[in-house]
Image (cartoon, grey):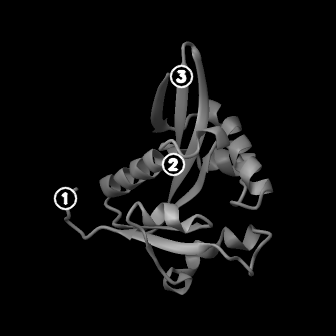
């Protein structure tokens, strides 16, 4: 069995949609429409497992650029049978590597799983410290304005080598 983290492709949209819908229905993340997934395909990476000739998407994560030096990790979803096996960590590490490659030194997330992100060097931040532009998705959430997600941020000093 092989696992690979790679950029999402068109054939991944429906498996991504299924994962996000599953966790969205549980109230654990904001689900996405198929049209938004097609529009934002370039933001997504997937974890694919291959067993012989059979391949399946078991995890997804998006890095969405918000501002000059700010991006958001969103839509992190791992199939339940693959949770706790490092898939989420690998997806986040890949997204942070892409942010670094793009010259983005600040990456935030809004999450119900803050301890997971703290282990990956994210720190707590007050939501009010984030630009208002980041709240555009929140307006479509059924929990708005009474959201209890926590905001965390990862920051790398400009010019730092990792």
Q: Secondary structure at mark 3?
A: strand
Q: Nearer the viewer, residue 142 or 2?
A: 2
* Rendered position, 77 above or below 124: above
Q: Which callout, 3 or 1, points at the residue further toward the start of the chain?
A: 3
User: Where is mark 2, residue-wise?
Assistant: 88
Q: CA distance from mark 3 to mark 1?
A: 33 Å
At 70% from the left and 49% from the top, the residue drawn is 20
The crowding category of the residue bearing disc 2, from other C-alpha atoms within 10 Å (few below 14, some 14 to 19, many at least 20), is: many
Q: Residue 66, can we see it?
A: yes
Q: How many marks?
A: 3
Q: Position of residue 135 (x, y in %)?
A: 62, 75
Which of the 4 image quadrants contains residue 48? top right
User: Where is mark 3, residue-wise?
Assistant: 50
Q: Position of residue 53 (x, y in %)?
A: 57, 13
Q: Is residue 22 left or right of residue 88?
A: right
Q: CA distance from mark 2 to mark 1?
A: 23 Å
Marks 3 and 1: which is nearer the front? 3
Marks 2 and 1: which is nearer the front? 2
Q: Are marks 3 and 1 in contact (CB under 8 Å)?
A: no
User: Where is mark 1, residue-wise?
Assistant: 161
């Amino acid at each position: 069995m092989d696992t690979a983290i790679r950029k999402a492709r068109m054939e991944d949209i429906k498996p991504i949609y299924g994962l996000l819908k599953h966790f969205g229905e549980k109230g654990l993340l904001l689900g996405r429409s198929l049209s938004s997934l097609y529009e934002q395909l370039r933001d997504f990476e997937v974890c694919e497992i291959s067993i012989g000739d059979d391949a399946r998407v078991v995890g997804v994560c998006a890095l969405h650029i918000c501002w000059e030096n700010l991006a958001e990790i969103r839509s992190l979803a791992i199939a339940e049978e693959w949770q706790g096996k490092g898939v989420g960590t690998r997806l986040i590490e890949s997204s942070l590597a892409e942010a670094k490659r793009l010259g983005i030194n600040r990456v935030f997330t809004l999450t119900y799983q803050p301890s997971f992100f703290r282990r990956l060097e994210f720190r707590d931040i007050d939501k009010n410290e984030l630009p208002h532009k980041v709240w555009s998705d929140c307006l479509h959430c059924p929990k708005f304005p009474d959201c209890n997600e926590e905001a965390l941020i990862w920051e790398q000093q400009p010019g730092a080598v990792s």
